[in-house]
Image (cartoon, rainbow, N blue to C red):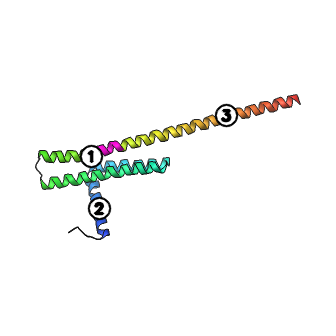
C-alpha cells in the first residue's frame, strides 16, 4: 500500500519515476537537455527574476506533462495492450498536452531572447553613442584649449 507513507519514501517513489522516465523516454531526456540549456542561458545572461520564474516554470510544466504522458502510456499499455480507438485518443491527447506546453515554453523563451538581445543591443548602441559623444567633447575641449593658447 502506497498511501500514508513517510515523506522520504514518497520522495524516493517520485525520484524512481523520474529515473524511469529518463531511462525509458528519449523525449524526456531531450526535454531535460532543453531545460539545462535554458538554465545555462539564464545563468549566463543574468536576467530579471521574472524571466527566471517564467522560464523555470515553463520547463517544470513541460517536464511534468511528459511525466504524466509517460505514466499514462505505461498504464494503458499494461492494462490494455491491444490497440483500441479510445486508447489511441487518450494517448494522443496526452501527447498533445505536452506539445502545447512545449510550444508555449518555446514562445516564452523566444520572448526572453528578443528582450534580452534588444536590451543588450540598446546598451551597446548607447555605450557606442556615449563614447562617440565623449570623444567629440574631448576633441572640442582640445580645440578650445588650442584656440585659447593661440589667443594668449
* Residue 97, percent from left and from top: 27, 46
Q: Which disc is residue 14 wearing? A: 2
- 152 to the left or right of 22: right
Q: Which disc is residue 33 wearing? A: none
The Cα–Cα distance between marks 3 and 1, rounded to whole angstroms, is 53 Å
Q: Which disc is residue 133 wearing? A: 3
First reached walking from the N terminus: tag 3 or tag 1: 1
Q: Quadrant of the C terminus?
A: top right
The Cα–Cα distance between marks 2 and 1, rounded to whole angstroms, is 21 Å
* Residue 7, percent from left and from top: 31, 69
State whether residue 95 is above or below residue 8.
above
Residue at left 34%, top 43%?
A: 104
Task: Give yes or no for residue 102 being in the magenta stretch.
Answer: yes
**Residue position marked by numbered label 1 in the rendering:** 97
In magenta, the rendered stretch is 100-104
User: 144 or 53: nearer the eye?
Assistant: 53
- Pointer 3 local density, CA inside 10 Å: few below 14, some 14–19, many at least 20: few
* Residue 147, percent from left and from top: 82, 29
Amino acid at each position: 500500500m502506497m498511501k500514508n507513507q513517510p515523506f522520504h519514501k514518497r520522495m524516493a517513489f517520485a525520484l524512481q519515476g523520474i529515473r524511469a522516465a529518463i531511462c525509458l523516454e528519449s523525449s524526456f531526456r531531450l526535454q531535460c537537455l532543453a531545460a539545462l540549456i535554458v538554465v545555462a542561458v539564464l545563468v549566463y545572461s543574468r536576467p530579471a527574476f521574472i524571466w527566471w520564474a517564467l522560464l523555470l516554470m515553463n520547463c517544470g510544466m513541460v517536464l511534468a506533462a511528459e511525466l504524466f504522458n509517460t505514466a499514462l502510456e505505461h498504464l494503458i499499455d499494461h492494462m490494455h495492450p491491444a490497440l483500441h480507438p479510445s486508447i489511441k485518443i487518450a494517448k494522443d491527447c496526452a501527447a498533445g498536452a505536452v506539445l502545447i506546453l512545449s510550444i508555449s515554453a518555446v514562445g516564452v523563451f523566444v520572448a526572453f531572447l528578443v528582450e534580452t538581445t534588444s536590451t543588450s543591443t540598446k546598451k551597446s548602441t548607447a555605450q557606442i553613442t556615449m563614447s562617440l559623444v565623449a570623444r567629440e567633447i574631448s576633441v572640442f575641449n582640445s580645440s578650445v584649449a588650442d584656440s585659447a593658447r593661440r589667443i594668449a
